[in-house]
């Protein structure tokens, strides 16, 4: 073979005609025109059948075609797709052996590994390609994406620095390098990189104008500054971030985010007066229903320490300082002045034993009289043993019962708070005498709920409502106002929920039956009765009741899902499948559609159903499907590594990385993984036949059924034998591949 032959390797160029065809192959692959690319590659290989780069590109196109066919056809034609993938691997390996000094071949080899999620091997291939062409931007970018995906943070930073050195005029490269420094924990360095980037811009540049990208970049830099350490108290970064907010105010589009960041910094630095003003600005912008802002406002009023402020900032739902820890009389009085109106605040202050009767001129309740959050927060500020609390909770319950609010019972249950001792963070030089702190936890045990003061008070009030409404159709506190007949119905419903919370299932069922007799078309009543029956142990009757409620409204997805879940817990899998299929695609198996939608709750319940029946094989399959969903969640972040940088949504991208790092600790994944481990251990301890592998009882069959069953068993044995041969061949081929790779590395 001549040394000028392109098939001889060593990066010898193709003739012009074939070189143009090869460029078209790359272009068609990038534009996903795979058939055209394959046609051009075959044209080149007709003249140069051993050209390494063309062989690799053809293998890459064949692999992409197999992947696209698999995505379009789902689980059909798996054997054909497997053959295509094997052909692609063989083509790429052959091309690599023909030209091992080509960075294109090694790059394609890495892309092939990346398509199979074998990122470690892909990174090795990219590094080998960079030894040949160290300044190839495309290879560097691809390797950087894999490094952040694998959380090789040091390697990611080094790769992005090399890219920035090669192309310092690109905004994306600057931002990505700053992010790589940030995720490595060097916040000061990341802020310095952003400063250097801004210094390269002209004064009339877009980055200095008011727009979304400039706003997000400025707020990201502010977040980085807040995470820096420094100063004797460790708050130097917070001070810098607070000062930086004033500098970027003119470019920020997200004014609510700007105010929330400012509020957080002010609280941590102890600037409580300024924090109050910031809270009022947020209230004016419509954040009166945001409990996070209310929690911060309470911290400013009470002048809480930094640890408490940070705890309140991390609370979710309706959490505030009042639901975080017990309040002293002074703190309670201060908050009542801020959240109560003139009448009820004076009564509450007197009930708490405070002689200071001065009332705030402008309380939040007076400024925002229609705010539901302010009215609800006011209840948490009152002492449960006070008369004002009883009066306020009485008015609150009456108002919600008249409206017919089904969620009132669960709303009230958030006030079943119990004190708990927790370890306290003791700083250097602080006394270790008080190493614990008192925090509230929500009572969940029926014994604790039944003995709780708030629960007992609500029970007394609701019982009095039922007695008065049944006799006079009025509330006890107002005997002159006649309410609607449905008010008694919702009072029964609330009392049933209180019975459920206290595990008094028989009494709850008696009351909910009255509700159903009164209004047999209300779906909520059937749902509650099903929960009471399930809590009492009659899961079959619970499934019948909730299915009857589902039949009242075929358009309600929630009640349909609840019926499906209860049927699965009752072991009625086929009925559950019929119910859930009402909200899936009509064509095909509904379970395939549910798998595509990653409906983990259904798959977990179905797996539990089969496990309880002893069908461990099908159960294991569903548990593994849930685990596969979480693996897909982890893989899906790959698409956002460059997208978020390009769109400059850097703050959200940092939250995404944190979420992905904590993905494997989520409850559904933990539940599925635990059951998979249990099943494998059970099969290891009891290696008997599975239910689906047991021989059928031929004696109870008719001759035709016996013949059919024996044919099925014979086909199963034949399939298992052929599968064993395939596994043996695959093992042998893997050994050959590893040996060839070893020889290649030696070369």
Image (tube, rainbow, N blue to C red):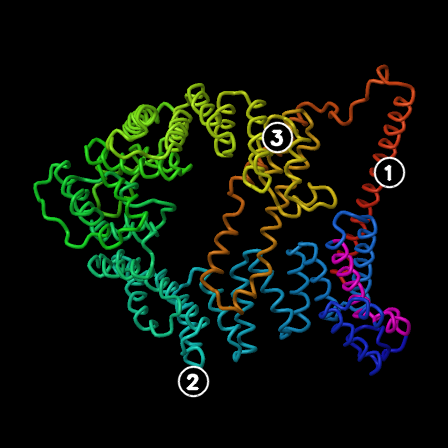
**Depicted 35 relative to depicted 408: above or below:** below
Can you give x and y, in whole percent of width and height, for residue 88 in the image?
80, 59
Q: Dot 3 corresponds to which residue?
A: 568
Are the residues at dot 3 and dot 2 in contact (C-beta closer than 8 Å)?
no
Depth order, front residue of 45/713 = 713
* Image location of residue 338, percent across then percent down: 20, 50
Residue 525 against residue 723 in the figure, above or below: above
How far apart are the alpha carbons under marks 1 and 2?
Answer: 70 Å
Q: Position of residue 604 (x, y in %)?
A: 60, 36
Kindly identify which numbered label has been placed on residue 202: 2
Which stretch appears magenta? 41-70
Q: Quadrant of residue 91?
A: bottom right
Is 395 left, or right, of 87 in this rendering? left
Residue identified by numbered label 1: 722
> What secondary structure predominates along the stretch shown in magenta?
helix
First in residue order: circle 3 vs circle 1: 3
Badge 2 density bin: few <14, some 14–19, many ≥20, Cα 10 Å: few
Mark 3: which secondary structure?
Answer: helix
Does residue 58 appear in this view?
A: yes
Determine whether the residue tagged by mark 2 lies in a helix, strand or loop: loop
Could one spot residue 451 in this view of the protein?
A: no
Q: Earlier in the sequence, mark 3 or mark 2?
A: 2
Quadrant holding the C terminus: bottom right
Between circles 1 and 2, the one closer to the viewer is: 2
């Amino acid at each position: 073979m001549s040394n000028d032959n392109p098939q001889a390797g060593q990066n010898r160029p193709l003739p012009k005609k074939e070189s143009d065809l090869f460029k078209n192959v790359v272009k068609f692959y990038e534009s996903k025109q795979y058939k055209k690319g394959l046609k051009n590659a075959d044209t080149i290989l007709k003249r140069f059948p051993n050209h390494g780069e063309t062989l690799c590109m053809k293998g890459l196109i064949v692999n992409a075609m197999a992947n696209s066919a698999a995505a379009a056809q789902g689980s059909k034609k798996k054997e054909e797709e497997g053959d295509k993938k094997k052909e692609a691997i063989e083509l790429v390996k052959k091309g690599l052996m023909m030209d091992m000094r080509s960075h294109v071949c090694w790059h394609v080899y890495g892309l092939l590994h990346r398509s199979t999620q074998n990122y470690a091997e892909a990174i090795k291939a990219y590094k080998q390609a960079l030894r040949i062409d160290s300044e190839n931007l495309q290879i560097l970018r691809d390797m950087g994406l894999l490094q952040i995906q694998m959380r090789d943070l040091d390697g990611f930073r080094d790769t992005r620095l090399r890219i920035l050195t090669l192309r310092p005029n690109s905004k994306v490269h600057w931002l990505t390098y700053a992010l790589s420094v940030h995720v490595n924990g060097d916040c000061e360095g990341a802020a310095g990189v952003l400063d250097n980037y801004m210094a390269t811009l002209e004064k009339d540049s877009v980055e200095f104008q008011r727009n979304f990208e400039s706003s997000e970049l400025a707020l990201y830099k502010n977040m980085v500054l807040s995470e820096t350490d420094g100063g004797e108290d460790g708050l130097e970064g917070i001070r810098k971030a607070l000062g930086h907010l004033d500098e970027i105010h003119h470019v920020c589009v997200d004014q609510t985010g700007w105010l929330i960041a400012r509020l957080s910094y002010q609280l941590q630095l102890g600037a409580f007066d300024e924090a109050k003003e910031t809270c009022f600005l947020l209230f004016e912008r419509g954040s009166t229903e945001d409990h996070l802002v209310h929690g911060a406002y309470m911290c400013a009023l009470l002048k809480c320490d930094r640890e408490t402020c940070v705890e309140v900032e991390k609370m979710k739902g309706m959490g505030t300082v009042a639901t975080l820890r017990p309040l002293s009389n002074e703190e309670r009085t201060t908050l009542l002045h801020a959240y109560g109106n003139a009448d009820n605040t004076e009564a509450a202050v007197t009930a708490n034993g405070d002689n200071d009767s001065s009332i705030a001129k402008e309380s939040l309740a007076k400024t925002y009289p229609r705010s539901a959050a302010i009215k609800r927060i006011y209840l948490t500020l009152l002492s449960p043993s006070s008369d004002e609390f009883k009066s306020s909770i009485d008015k609150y319950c009456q108002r919600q019962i008249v409206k017919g609010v089904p969620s009132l019972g669960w709303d009230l249950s958030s006030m079943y708070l119990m004190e708990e001792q927790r370890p306290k963070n003791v700083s250097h030089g602080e006394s270790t005498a008080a190493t614990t702190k008192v925090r509230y936890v929500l009572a969940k045990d029926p014994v604790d709920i039944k003995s709780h003061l708030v629960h007992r008070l609500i029970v007394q009030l609701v019982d009095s409502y039922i007695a008065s409404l049944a006799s006079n159709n009025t509330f006890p506190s107002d005997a002159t106002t006649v309410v609607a007949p449905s008010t008694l119905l919702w009072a029964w419903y609330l009392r049933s929920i209180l019975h459920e919370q206290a595990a008094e299932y028989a009494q709850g069922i008696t009351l909910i039956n009255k509700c159903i007799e009164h209004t047999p078309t209300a779906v909520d009543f059937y749902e509650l009765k099903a929960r009471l029956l399930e809590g009492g142990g009659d899961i079959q009757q619970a499934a019948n009741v909730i299915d009857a409620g589902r039949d009242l409204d075929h358009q309600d997805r929630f009640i349909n899902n609840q019926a499906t879940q209860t049927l699965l817990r009752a072991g009625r899998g086929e009925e559950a499948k019929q119910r859930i299929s009402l909200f899936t695609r009509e064509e095909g198996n509904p379970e395939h559609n549910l798998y595509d939608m990653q409906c983990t709750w259904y798959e977990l319940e179905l797996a539990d159903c089969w496990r309880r029946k002893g069908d461990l094989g099908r159960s294991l399959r569903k548990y593994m499907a849930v685990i596969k969903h979480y693996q897909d969640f982890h893989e899906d972040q790959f698409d956002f590594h460059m997208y978020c940088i390009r769109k400059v949504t850097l703050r959200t991208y940092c939250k995404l990385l944190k979420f992905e790092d904590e993905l494997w600790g989520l409850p559904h994944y933990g539940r599925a993984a635990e059951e998979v481990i249990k099943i494998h251990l059970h099969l290891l301890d009891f290696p008997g036949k599975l239910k689906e592998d047991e021989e059928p009882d031929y004696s109870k069959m008719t001759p035709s059924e016996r013949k059919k069953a024996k044919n099925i068993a014979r086909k199963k044995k034949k399939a298992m034998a052929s599968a064993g041969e395939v596994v043996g061949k695959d093992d042998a081929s893997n050994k050959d591949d590893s040996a060839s790779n070893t020889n290649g590395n030696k070369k």
